[in-house]
Image (tube, grey):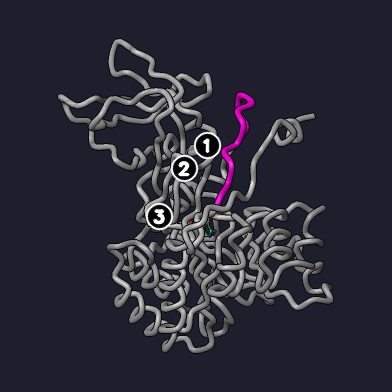
Amino acid sequence: MAIDYSALPSPCFILDERLLRRNLAIVREVQDRTGVTILLALKGFAMFSAFPLLRQYLSGVTASSLHEAVLGSEEFGGDVHVYCPAYRPQEIGRLLDLGSHITFNSLSQWERYRTELQASPRAISPGLRINPGYSPVTTELYNPCAPGSRLGVSATQLGEKLPDGIEGLHIHNLCESDSRALEFTLRLVERDFGRFLPALRWLNLGGGHLMTGEEYDLEHLYSLLRDFRSRYPNLRLVLEPGSAIAWRTGYLLATVLDIVPTAELPVAMLDVSIAAHMPDCLEMPYRPHIQGALEATSGLPTYKMGGLSCLAGDVVGDYSFKQPLKEGDRVVFDDMIHYTMVKTTTFNGINLPSIGIWREDDRFELIREFAYEDYRNRLS
Ligand SMILES: Cc1ncc(COP(=O)(O)O)c(C=O)c1O
C-alpha cells in the first residue's frame, strides 16, 4: 500500500519496516552462504526502536564510542565490537566491561591499555586497526586511507611481528563499495599483512560493503568470502556495515512553508534543514532524490529546496515538478535513514524531525517527537 503522507506528522523520519526486512534478508543470506558474521555499525544507523527486528538477523553491533557501546549493550545485546580512533583513560574501564572485542588504532594505544585489558576479569578480544593504504573513496572527507590518515597502522609500522596479545586485525577502507573493491582490498591484506593472519582469531573487514544495493554482485561476494575463509579457517571474518543495513529503507517527510523568489530559481522553503537534518547532502555533497520530482527541466516549475536555518548554503537542488509547489505541499526525500538521525543537530534551535515507522501491516507508528527540552538539554 502506498503511504499517504498527507496524514503523517511533518517533519518526520519514516523507517519503512518492509524495506528494512528486505535488506536484512540479504544480509542473512550472506551470513548463511559464507559463514561470516555481520554486525550493525551504530554510527550509521542507531534507531533502537528497530533493534527488535535487526536482532533477528544480526548477532551484534560495532560501536565507535562509549555511548554507542552502552546503547548496543543495553538496547541490542549480543556482541559489542568496539573501535575508537583513541580511547580516553576515564572511559576504557567501562568499554572493557561492555565490549566483546576491542580494536586499537595505534601501537601506542595498545601499549597504553594492554595491562588494563589483560587484568580485566572479562574475556575481551583485542585487535589492531591496520591501514592498507588503499581506498576506492575519492571524496577526501570520507577516505580513511588518504596520505597522512590517522586511521590505522601501516604494514611498515608493524614490522615482522604483531605485539604479543593481539588476536585480530581490523580494516575499514570502503564506502558504498562493490565486491571488486573488497577483492582488491583482500589481495592487499594478504600481500602486506598475510604473515600475521595464520596466528590470528579474527579479521574485521569494516563497513562500506553495499551488499543491499541493486548493482551489488552477491555471487561474487559469496565466492570471495568463502575462498578467503578456506585459506584461513582459523579466522572469524566480520563485516560491520552501516549504510548497507539501512540503505533505501525510508524517508524524510517535509512540508513547504513558503516559496521565495530569487534572481535565479525560486526556493521552496521547507520545515527541515539540510544542514541540521541531512548534513551528508552538503558534506559529500549529493543531491537527494525527492519522490515525484524530476531533474531540472526547462519548461517545468523548478526549485531549489531551502532549509530552515539561516545558513546561506542550507539549500539543495535543483528539482522540477509537474505542478508548481505551494505552501502546505509535502516533499518526501528518499533514502534518509542512514547517516541522518545519527548526525542531526539542533543548530539554530530548529526542532528535530519526529521519528516514525511505517509498519509491515501498513500502519504508521509515531515513535518519538522532540521538543524544546531536547534542544535545551544539549546546552548549559
Ligand atoms: C570503522 C568503521 N566501521 C564501519 C563503518 C560503517 O561503514 P558503512 O556505513 O559505510 O557501511 C564505518 C564508517 O565510517 C567505520 O568507520
Mark 1: C-beta under 8 Å from nearest atom of ligand 1: no
Which disc number belongs to residue 11?
1
Pick the residue in front: 103 or 216. 216
Q: Residues within 10 Å of mark 1 (few under 14, many from 20)?
A: many
Which disc number belongs to residue 46?
none
- Residue type, mark 2 in image: Leu
Residue 225 in view, yes or no:
yes
Q: Is disc 2 in contact with disc 1, using a CB cutoff of under 8 Å?
A: yes
Whichever of callouts 1 and 3 sits on the residue coming sooner in the sequence is 1
Report whether 200 appears left or right of 125.
left
Pick the residue in front: 233 or 316. 316
Which disc number belongs to residue 248?
3
- Looking at the rendered structure, the secondary structure element under dot 2 is strand
The stretch of residues the image draws in magenta is 345-356
Residue that mark 2 sits on: 252
Question: Residue 111 at what x, y percent from top left?
Answer: 72, 63
Taking the spot 37% from the left edge, 67% from the top edge, the residue there is: 182
Taking the spot 38% from the left edge, 28% from the top edge, the residue there is: 305
Question: Residue 72 at what x, y percent from top left?
Answer: 67, 63
- Looking at the rendered structure, the secondary structure element under dot 1 is loop
- Looking at the rendered structure, the secondary structure element under dot 3 is loop
- Residue type, mark 1 in image: Pro
Report whether 19 appears left or right of 128.
left
- Residue type, mark 3 in image: Arg
